[in-house]
């Protein structure tokens, strides 16, 4: 008895196989393009989410309150305007100013260390209410990237002899 298979192979043994639509190389190219497109899309959306624009205090006052719109506003702390009702309470009220305009702000939470520095720029994220109060959700403090001393201000390690006024102790 001789065995005969039910189906014969499509190509005879030793003959060259016909190339399929997606060879190994084409599969790698397609996978590479899909991955590149996916990473490009995720990078684009992440960059858009990380980019944030803010208004200055004078721009916000000129624009007026928007109904429930979350936004960021930048300004400087008005000296003497900070108030916290009690030491047990974390609700703080203060004012920001820039270019002659001023807004009242309220924040419930711990403030950053450099909040009270007169050279710091403060960025608030929250909503501007119809009553003219900015309800703050988050507070950021921007510091100058380069130190610039005030006119007449001397560096911390500056030495001056009180008797002679000389700056070199030698």
Image: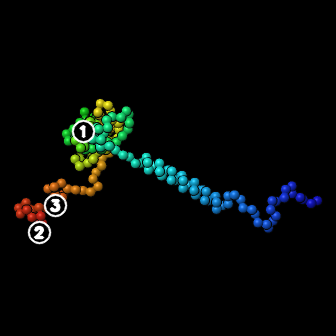
Label located before the other in sequence (1 or 2): 1
Of 62 and 56, nearer the camera is: 62
| Direction front: furthest residue | 62
Q: CA distance from mark 1 to mark 3?
A: 38 Å
Residue behind mark 2: 170
- Residue 113 visible to the viewer: no
Residue 150 picture location, percent across and down: 18, 54
**Vertical arrangement, residue 153 with respect to residue 114, above or below:** below
153 relative to 66, above or below? below
**Does the residue at mark 1 contact the one at mark 3 (Cβ under 8 Å)?**
no
Q: Are marks 1 and 2 in contact (CB under 8 Å)?
A: no
Of pointers 1 and 3, the one earlier in the residue sequence: 1
User: The residue tagged with tag 3: helix, strand or loop?
Assistant: loop
Residue pointed to by mark 1: 102
Residue 118's tag is none
State the CA–CA distance, disc 2 to disc 3: 14 Å
Residue at x 32%, y 43% (from the top left corner): 55
Instruction: Identify the secondary structure beneath mark 1.
Output: strand
The residue drawn where x is 32% and y is 37% is 63
Q: Is residue 125 visible?
A: yes
Q: Position of residue 39 (x, y in %)?
A: 52, 53
How many C-alpha atoms fall within 10 Å of the one at disc 2: few (<14), some, or many (≥20)? few
Q: Tell me residue 107's x, y (percent).
A: 31, 37
Specify the label residue 158 is tagged with. Answer: 3
Quarter occupied by the N terminus: bottom right
- For the point 58% across and 58% down, the residue is 32
Label 2 or label 3, whichever comes before in sequence order:
3
SS under mark 2: loop
Tell me how far mark 1 sits from mark 2, CA to CA: 51 Å
**In front of the other: label 1 or label 2?**
1
């Amino acid at each position: 008895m001789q065995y005969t298979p039910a189906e014969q192979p499509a190509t005879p043994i030793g003959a060259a196989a016909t190339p399929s639509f997606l060879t190994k190389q084409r599969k790698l190219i397609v996978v590479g393009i899909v991955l590149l497109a996916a990473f490009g899309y995720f990078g684009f959306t992440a960059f858009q989410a990380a980019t944030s624009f803010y208004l200055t205090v004078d721009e916000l006052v000129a624009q007026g309150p928007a109904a429930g719109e979350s936004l960021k506003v930048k300004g400087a702390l008005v000296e003497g305007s900070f108030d916290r009702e009690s030491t047990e309470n974390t609700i703080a009220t203060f004012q920001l100013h820039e270019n002659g305009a001023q807004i009242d702000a309220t924040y419930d939470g711990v403030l950053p260390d450099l909040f009270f520095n007169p050279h710091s720029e403060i960025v608030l994220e929250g909503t501007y209410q119809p009553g003219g109060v900015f309800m703050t959700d988050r507070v950021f403090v921007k510091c100058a990237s380069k130190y610039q001393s005030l006119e007449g201000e001397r560096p911390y390690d500056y030495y001056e002899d009180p008797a002679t006024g000389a700056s070199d102790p030698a």
